[in-house]
Image: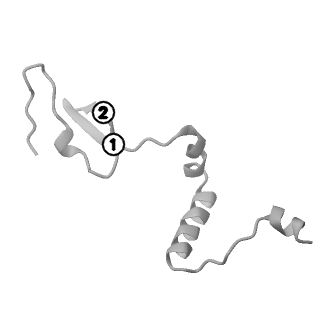
Amino acid sequence: MLLTIDSRKRIPLGRLLADDGAVFFDASVVDGKIILEPMRAVPDKEAWLYKNPEALAMVRQGLKDAGEGKVKPYRSLKQKSVNK
C-alpha cells in the first residue's frame, strides 16, 4: 500500500487499521525504513495473564470448552456453604 505525506508532513494510517478495535504501532527505523508493528494495548491488571503461559492456556481451553458447550452450571463456594 502506498501512503503519501499530507501538507502538514503527516502520514495517514487510517487505511491500515482494522475495524475491530484500537490498534497501536511500535515504530522503529531499520536501514532507513520506518517499520510499524501493529499492537493491541493490554491493561496492566490483565498483562500478568500473557506472562503466564500455563494460566493463558487454561483460559483458552476454558473458552474453547464453553464454545463447544462442554461446561456445567457453577455454584460458588459461598452458595455451597450456605446450603449445608
Q: Mark 2 — residue?
A: 27
- For the point 34% across and 48% down, which residue is it? 21
- For the point 55% across and 75% down, which residue is it? 65
Q: Reply above or below: 31 against 65.
A: above
Q: Position of residue 40 (x, y in %)?
A: 40, 44
Q: Position of residue 60 (x, y in %)?
A: 54, 65
**Closer to the eye: label 2 or 1:** 1
- For the point 59% across and 51% down, which residue is it? 49
For residue 74, which numbered disc appears in the image?
none
Scheme of colours in the image: one colour
Q: Reply above or below: 81 against 4.
A: below
Q: Mark 1 — residue?
A: 23
In the rendered image, which quarter contains the C terminus?
bottom right
Snapshot quadrant of residue 22: top left
Q: Residue furthest top?
A: 8
Instruction: Classify mark 1: helix, strand or loop.
Output: loop
Snapshot quadrant of residue 31: top left
User: Between marks 2 and 1, how big is the CA–CA gap?
Assistant: 13 Å
Q: Position of residue 34 (x, y in %)?
A: 22, 33
The amino acid sitting under disc 2 is Ala
Give the camera-side residue of 73 and 51: 73
